Image (cartoon, helix red, strand yellow):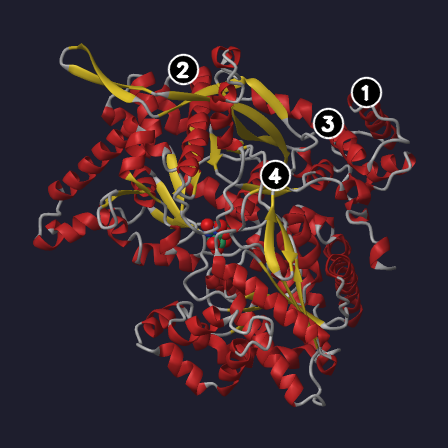
Amino acid sequence: DSAAEMPMAAAWTAPLLSQTGDTVVDLRESIRAKLTFALGRTPESARPRDWFVATAMALRERVVAACMASEKAVPNKRVYYLSLEFLIGRLMSDAMNNLGLTDTTRAALRELGVDLDAVQDAEPDAALGNGGLGRLAACFMDSMASIGIPAIGYGIRYDHGLFRQSFEDGWQREAPETWLAEGNPWEFVRPDATYAIGFGGTVTLSSPGEGVIRRHWQPAETVRAVAHDIPVVGWRGRHVNRLRLWKAEAGEPVDLGRFNDGDHVGAVAARMRAEAISRVLYPSDSSADGQELRLRQEYFFTSASLQDLIARHVMERGDVRSLPDHAAIQLNDTHPAIAVPELMRILMEDHDLSWEDAWHVTTHTLNYTNHTLLPEALETWPVELMERLLPRHMQIIYLINWMHLEEQAKHGRQDAAHQDAAYLASISLIDEAHGRRVRMGHLAFHGARRVNGVSALHTDLMRSTVFAPLHALDPDKIVNKTNGITFRRWLHNANPGLTRLAVETVGAGVLDDPELLRGLEAHAEDPAFVARYAAVRRQRKEALAKVVAERTGIDIDPDALFDIQVKRIHEYKRQLLNVVETVALYQAIKAEPHRDWTPRVKIFAGKAAPSYVRAKLIIKLACDVAKAVNDDPEVAGRLKVVFLPNYSVSLAETIIPGADLSEQISTAGMEASGTGNMKFALNGALTVGTLDGANIEIRDHVGADNIFIFGLDAAGVQAREAEPGYAAKAIQASPRLAAALDMIASGRFSPEEPGRFRPLTDDLRQRDQYLLTADFDDYWRVQRSIDAAWRDPRGWWAKAIRNTARMAWFSSDRSMREYADEIWRVRLG
Ligand code: GL5
C-alpha cells in the first residue's frame, strides 16, 4: 500500500486496549457534543481545526478525573522541573496513544465523516522551545508521567513560540508563530494559582529585636503570574502529571485615572510592560542573550514556580524546613539559576529561616543540569542590571559569594597556589574580567546538591574545563546523566510501521519495555524480515518525498540514499562541512559523469537565530548550492539537495523515519549530547558522526561496525587548535577541499553577487574555529565508504536493524530512572 494510505497513527495499538473503557460510540457522542455545545458548530460547517478542538476537548475530559486524583494525592516526594523551554509539539497523538484511544478515536471520527489524520494535522505545534534543550524537557515530562515519577514541569506560556521560518530567494525570513490564535484546548486556566512577582525598588532594614536585623524588599513594580495547566498523561494512562505554564498579567488591567484624562494608550502602558514578559520565546539557541526582558522572564517564572511549590509544601507538610525531604527541584540549564537567591529570600523573608537554615534547605533541594560548555552560551548578567532589577537578590548573591570565598581560606586552602587572586577569581560567582557580571553557571553550581552533564564526554569536559576549580572543591557533586528520548513519540507515534513490525516480531511487550527491541537482532540477516523492514523505510521515504515536493517543489527519488542533517543552524554543528562536501561531490560527479555514483539526496532543515548573520549565510549557501545542483542535468539522478523550511517537532516526526543516513558532525567537544542523533538511530538510520556528545555512547551501543565515525576527537581538536595556521595547511594539503572552497568563493553559486560567500570561505582559510578544514578529508573518505556500503543492501539493512535493536538504553525512561535514583532520590509511583 502507498504512503498516502498509511495512517499516521495506526493499528499497531491493537495490543493496547482503551485505558478509559470508552467505546467508539462514547467517544463519537462526546466529540459531537463538544463541537455543538463548546464550539457552536455543526458538523457541516466545522473546519478541520474545529474537529481538532472538539476531539482534543473530548480526550481532555478523559484525563480530568485522573488529573484531579493526582492533584489531590500527596506523594512522598515530588520533582519540580524548571525550564524556560518546553518544545512539546503536538499533543493529540500522545494523549490518544497513552490512553489507548487511537483506534477508538479514528473510528469515532470516521463515523462522523472525518479523517483522523486531517484532524491531527490541524493541531498547531506548541513550539515553546528552540531546540534540543527544550525538546529534552518535553521528553522528560512524558517519561516521568509514564514511569510514575510525581512531577510538575514549570515554564512560561509564551503567546508566540519559536518563529515561523520561510525562505525568500534562499534567505531566511522570520514571522511570528501563533499557536494560541484559536485557543488551547489542552489547558486549564488556574486563576486561583496566581502569584505576585516583584521587580526593582529598594531594600529596607528592620530590627525585630535582640540585635537581629532583617532585610525587606519593596519592589517598585509588581506583575502577576497566572497558572495554566496542561495535563501530561503517561503511558497507558496510569499516571498524570502537570505542565504548569505561567502567563504574565498586570496588577491593574488599565490605569483609569490616565484613561479618564484622555491618555488612552498610556492608560494600558503598565499592562503592556507586564504582559511583554510572556509574549515571546527568545529565539536564541546555545547562546546567551543579554536582554533585560530575558532576565525578567527568568525571574518571573522561577519566582512563581518557587512560590507555588512552597505553598503546596507548606499546605501538605506544615513546615518549610522539610522541603528537601519532599521536593527535588531541577534547574534546566542556568535559565532558572536565580532560584538560588530567590529560594533563600523566600525562606528568610516569608518563613523567618536563619541564613544557615535557608542555605541548608536551598542546597539540599536544588539541582542543576548543564547543557553546553560553549563560552558564548554561558549566561552572565551585568551586576548593574541585577542591582537595578533584583536588588535583594544581588545582596544575597554577594553574601553567598563572600562566604564561599572565605571558606576556601578556612578549609585547607591556605597554600600559596590556592590563595592567589587568579584562583579566587576562577571560583568567584562574580566575573570581574569582563565588566562585573554574575556567572549564573557558578551560582547554580554552588547552590545545587547535584550538578549533571548530559553525556559522558560532556560531563568529563565539565570536570576538566569550565567547572574544574569548583569540581575540585566538591568532587562528588558532578554526575553524568546521558540524555534520552521518548520512544512513544519518536518510535511508536512517528513510525507506526516499524513499531508494528517490532510488535509482531518480538511481542507487544516491546511497547512497555524497549529492551525487547534486542530481539530484532536475530533477524538482521533474515531475508523475510529485512524485506519488511525495508518496506517500512520505503513507505516513510515516499511520505517524506511527498512533503518535500509539496513544500519545495523538488522531486526526490526514494531509491536514492536520503542523507539528512536537521537541527538548529550553528557553526559548531558544521552544516557548512556538509555543504562543502556536497560541492566537492558535485565537482567529482561532473569530472567523471560516467562513474557508478551512489545516488544521494542531501536534505537539510533547521532555523538560525534571527541575529546570527553567519548561520543565515550558511542557509543561503545551502539554498544556492541546491539550486545550482538541482538545475544541472549532468548530475541528475545522482545528486539532489533540499532545504526544507520551517523545521519543527511535527516535521521531524515525518523526516526522521525517512532517513537512511543521519549527519551528526559537530566539532568534537562542542555538542553537549545531541538527541536527534538518538531519534535517527532508533529508526534505523546509520550515523555519520564525530566522536562528540552522545555519538560516542551510541557507537558503544550499536557497535563500531554499524556507525561511520570520522574526524578528530575532543583531545585532537584541542591539540589542533594550538597549531598556528592549521587551516591554511590543511587546505594546502587537500586539493579537493581547496577546489570546493575556490568554487564557492568564485561566485559560481551566486553569480548575481560573486562575493556573497567570501565571509565564509575567508574565515575557513584564515581562522576556521570549528576545524572544518581539519576534518574535511576524513569526512570525504567516510562518505565514500558510505556510498560503497549502500551498494550492498544486505549489509546496509543488517546495520540498520542492529541500530534499532540496540538503542533501548537511549530511552528517556532510562534517563529519568537515573535522575530519580541518583539525583532526586524519589520513589516511582
Ligand atoms: C543543548 C545542547 O546543545 C545539545 O547538545 C543537548 O542535546 C541539549 C539537551 O541536553 O542541550 N544545549 C542548549 O543550549 N541547547 C541544546 O540543544 O539548545
**Dots 3, 4 in contact, CB < 8 A:** no
Camera sees residue 399: yes
Among numbered discs 3 and 1, the one appearing first in the sequence? 1
Among numbered discs 3 and 4, the one appearing first in the sequence? 3
Residue identified by numbered label 2: 318
Label 1 near ligand 1 (CB < 8 Å) = no
Q: Secondary structure at mark 4?
A: helix
The part of the image, by quadrant, that contains residue 334 is top left
The residue carrying pointer 1 sits among few (fewer than 14), some (14 to 19) or many (20 or more) residues within 10 Å by Cα, namely few
Left or right, residue 726 beside residue 624: left
Among numbered discs 4 and 2, the one appearing first in the sequence? 4
**Dots 2, 1 in contact, CB < 8 A:** no
Residue identified by numbered label 1: 37
- Label 3 and label 1: CA atoms lie apart by 17 Å
The residue carrying pointer 3 sits among few (fewer than 14), some (14 to 19) or many (20 or more) residues within 10 Å by Cα, namely some
- Label 3 and label 2: CA atoms lie apart by 33 Å
The residue carrying pointer 4 sits among few (fewer than 14), some (14 to 19) or many (20 or more) residues within 10 Å by Cα, namely many
Among numbered discs 2 and 1, the one appearing first in the sequence? 1
